[in-house]
Image (cartoon, rainbow, N blue to C red):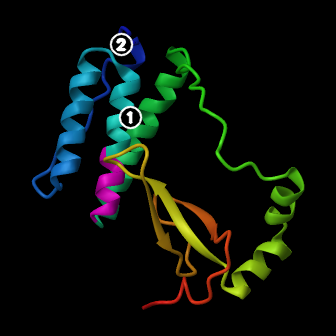
Amino acid sequence: MTLSIPDSLVSFVIPSSERTDPEPVKSSLLLARSDFERGELREALRHLRRAAEGADQAGSEHRAVALARAAADLATEVGGSASPPPVETTSAPSTVFPVSAVRSATDPASIEHLLASGQAIEVSIKRSTRDDGLYVVRRAHGEGPPLGSRRAVVVLLEADDGFFEAP
């Protein structure tokens, strides 16, 4: 959806790529700028967020924060000026768990039991910047999740002693 750029964004500038940016960050910023200039604010925002995630994955924390801040500024404006994106319908999951199983699995005592038994592991997870259907999952090491990630627990549906142990 192409929109005219609101007056509040006339002075907004998509950050320029820097010499030290990895290629995925540079290309995401280029796409963001192109979309922004065409008035495709949601697409520009999507690419700007990918640039921030790419900088984070490359270990450039300060750059990731700067790009995330620019994305947040743009998101604030996009949220107020554009209609929400269409809701995608998805097919039903192939495995359906009874509600009682889902409720008991989210009980902190159950999660602790699964973690202690080795059937589950705490991770940080985030969507891949290159493939929207791919998630990057890393073992959590006690600290908070990295920028753009969420804390999660991976549970094996079938017990497998030692699966989560280092090889």
Q: Please name the amino acid that badge 1 sits on.
A: Arg
Circle 1 Cα neighbour tier, 10 Å, few/some/many (<14 / 14–19 / ≥20): some
The residue located at (36%, 26%) in the rendering is 43
Magenta part, dominant SS = helix
Residue furthest top in the image: 4
User: Magenta segment, which residues?
Assistant: 51-58
Closer to the camera, 103 or 48? Answer: 103
| Nearest to the observer: residue 115 or residue 29 | 115
Residue 44: x and y, percent?
33, 28
* Residue at which label 1 appears: 46
Q: Are the two marked residues, 1 and 2, in contact with CB atoms closer than 8 angstroms?
A: no
**Residue 54 disc label:** none
Q: Is residue 125 left or right of residue 57?
A: right
CA distance separating discs 1 and 2: 16 Å
The residue that disc 2 covers is 5
Q: Is residue 148 visible?
A: no
Badge 2: residue crowd in 10 Å (few <14, some 14–19, many ≥20): some
Snapshot quadrant of residue 30: top left
Q: Amino acid at mark 2?
A: Ile
Residue 54 within the magenta-colored segment of the rendering: yes
